[in-house]
Image: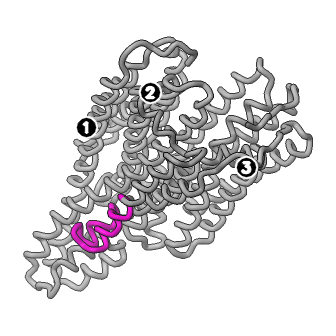
Amino acid sequence: MVQTTANPVSGSKAWLVVTAACLGTSVVAYNSNAVITALLAIKSSLDLEPQTVQWVVNAYMLASAALIAVMGRFADIFGKLRIFLIGTAIFAAGSLIIVFAEAGWMVLLGRLCQGMGGAAIFTVSAALISVATVEEKRAAALGLWSASIGFGYGVGPLIGGYLADSVSWRGIFVVDILVLAIAALLGFRVLKLGLIREKRDPDVKVDYWGVALLVVTLGTLVYGLTNGHRAGWTSLQTFALFGTALLGAFLFALQERRAPDPLVYFSFFRHGRYIAATFGMFVTGFLFLGVLYFYNLFAQSPGALDFTPFEAGFSMLPFTLAMFVVSLIAPRLLAPYSFHWPVTIGMITLTAGAWLMHYTTDQSSYWELWWKLAILGTGIGLNLSTLPRVGLRALPDESAGQGSGVISTCLYIGIAMGIAAGGVVTAYITRSFIAPAVQSLTQGSTDTRALEMALTHGSQNQIERIVSQFSPEDAERIRTAMQDSLDNAYAGVMEMMALLALVGAVVCFFAIRGAVPKKDA
């Protein structure tokens, strides 16, 4: 393994590293929530289809999920600070691509770059702080790092909403570039001063085949889900995508069993606590951005709550504040205990929050919403702060890095799957309302299925062009059906989220049993 040492310095020199790491992680966290708030503005500006809008989030999350588990190994080969600087450069490059994007594919390309860079920044930033600070300063420095993540998530919706509302959604990514430029300058200063001295190990093995198979498996699975309703669930394309995903998963399992240094050690899953941690993080990710994604779309839709981007971002404060406060307090209060009940209660809290949110309609006031968002934020904060510790308690110390990487990967996979599955529910319910309206049109249509699909999956401009071709009576019938589908589609997504959280509660309740392993949390 790499022998990494840091100068035992204190004061401004050591805090150069801390500041650079905190700026990098805060940008990654800020960007996640800011983009969610600005999705409708991006959709409207570039006239994107709903499926493309989902991939604005999924492209980022899949890139992060595939790479977050290997960035630690890259750090061993090339050095932690170098990987951090490369990560900031790739993330900034992705932001620059999006700033000048004139089409959906450019946004997706930029988001892929951001996902790659974000995986590098998140993976090595905490390790940088650990090796650069003396023992007595380390806890405070890592606490500041955690706070920077919470700060990023908290201000993301506000800044993103304000920029999308008053300036331009592109301003979100300009902020990325400016803050990351400062982080990079600090990083180069650290490199020049030699505050972090590393002996790099070129013999560290990277499971490149495992990474490739993971990308193929996740990519085809998520694309199959997002495109299945349009292509047809029994179509050759859909079968091919799901078949490729299944084959990729099988080959990935074989690869991990024979690789000298695999991404995933399946022996970890012999421990019930580790199963609870990985599945629990999947469920938490599924609900985390899944709820925020569909809440923002509903909140900003003219036929629903009709919030501006800034109002939508501001409305999320109860969620982000509750998540931030609970994430800070829970580990300190619960460290000596089993986490059996805290994790189970966290899952039940998510179940309750999602179920309460399904009652939201276009007539709901914000006073009916804020406390439900706070409940969801509480559940997310409790799970994010306790589940990794549950899993790592089940593993030997020398496996902590590997085990932590898999747990983080499950979180990102859950996020991508949550948005994809929510899109399936939304499309199904939307079409169930549109189909009868299309069948009842007095003007008629030569291809009713094509019309239903266009109204369900088309961009706003495409839908308006279609509707304008019908008589006023038929156009109103279509608009009414689409309006009625909004509340029901949103409710259906929240019901699905609540059901999965309930499954998570049952799994965690039965898997986290027995005495606490005898080692420090």
Q: Identify the disc placed on residue 468.
A: none
Neighbor class of circle 2 (other Cα within 10 Å; few <14, some 14-19, many 20+) is: many
Q: Could one spot residue 187 in this view of the protein?
A: yes
Numbered tag placed on residue 355 in the rendering = 1
The label nearer to you, 1 versus 2, is 2
User: Is mark 1 in CB contact (under 8 Å) with mark 2?
Assistant: no
Kind of residue at badge 3: Ile
Who's the residue at 48% across and 72% down the image? 46
Secondary structure type for disc 3: helix
Q: Nearer the viewer, residue 332 or 198?
A: 198
Reply yes or no: does residue 234 show up in magenta: yes
Q: CA distance from mark 1 to mark 3?
A: 42 Å
Mark number for residue 382? Answer: 2
Residue 347 pos. (x, y %): 34, 30
Quadrant including the N terminus: top right
Identity, as a three-letter code, of the amino acid under mark 1 = Trp
Please rate how many residues cluster around mark 3, counting C-alpha atoms within 10 Å: few if below 14, some from 14 to 19, many from 20: many
Q: Which of disc 2 and disc 1 is earlier in sequence? A: 1
